[in-house]
Amino acid sequence: MGRYWLTMSDASAFTLVTSSVAIADSLRRELSDQAKVYVKVTPPELAVILLTAAESGWGKGKANQLVAQISEMKNADAGQRARVFKLVRDAFAQLPLTLWSQDKLAARRELLEEMTRQLHNLQGNLPSLPTREEVREQEWRQTLLAAGKLEQRARE
């Protein structure tokens, strides 16, 4: 029974690692395509960062450090930062729960909550998009202003 148990254990570990590498590859691609930020690490290195964070039980206070290890955020605007936090949070949520030991599951929850807080904070600083009515009003104002300028030129 011992050999079979080791084989099943190895297969489980292999599945966890390949899942993590696939999630890391997807995260790296999405960070480049959607957030338009430079990703500092390769997919395997990113998978190691994700696995290390899970094994070490990174929790509250580690979200910024995690994002800084992954991507270059020096020249990123608030919108890019928000997308980065969302994508990293979503990737962490996809990682299998078995990566965390029972005593470190609370740290996982805290890390996800901190990333969500960062995301909400950054989104709160973004200017809101104008409503359809506000856009229409602005167009009318510009039309009336242009018509007023034409009348003034005609008088001169």
Image (cartoon, grey):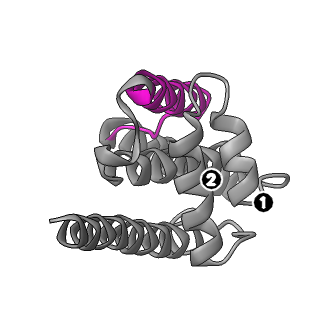
Please state if 52 lies on the left or on the right of 129 as rendered.
Answer: right
Q: Nearer the viewer, residue 149 or 123?
A: 123
Q: Is residue 77 magenta?
A: no
* Residue holding disc 1: 72
| Magenta: main secondary structure | helix
Q: Position of residue 55 (x, y in %)?
A: 53, 44
**Mark 2 or mark 1, which is nearer the start of the sequence?**
1
Residue at image position (54%, 66%) is 47
Please state if 73 lies on the left or on the right of 78 as rendered.
Answer: right
Q: Quarter of the image holding residue 56? A: top right
Please state if 143 lies on the left or on the right of 96 as rendered.
Answer: right
* Residue holding disc 2: 80
Q: Position of residue 79 (x, y in %)?
A: 60, 47
Q: Quarter of the image holding residue 109? A: top left
Distance of label 1 from label 2 (alpha carbons):
11 Å
Residue at image position (58%, 76%) is 44
Image quadrant containing the C terminus:
bottom right
Q: Position of residue 115 (x, y in %)?
A: 52, 33
Q: Nearer the viewer, residue 130 or 135?
A: 130
From this viewpoint, is residue 127 visible? no
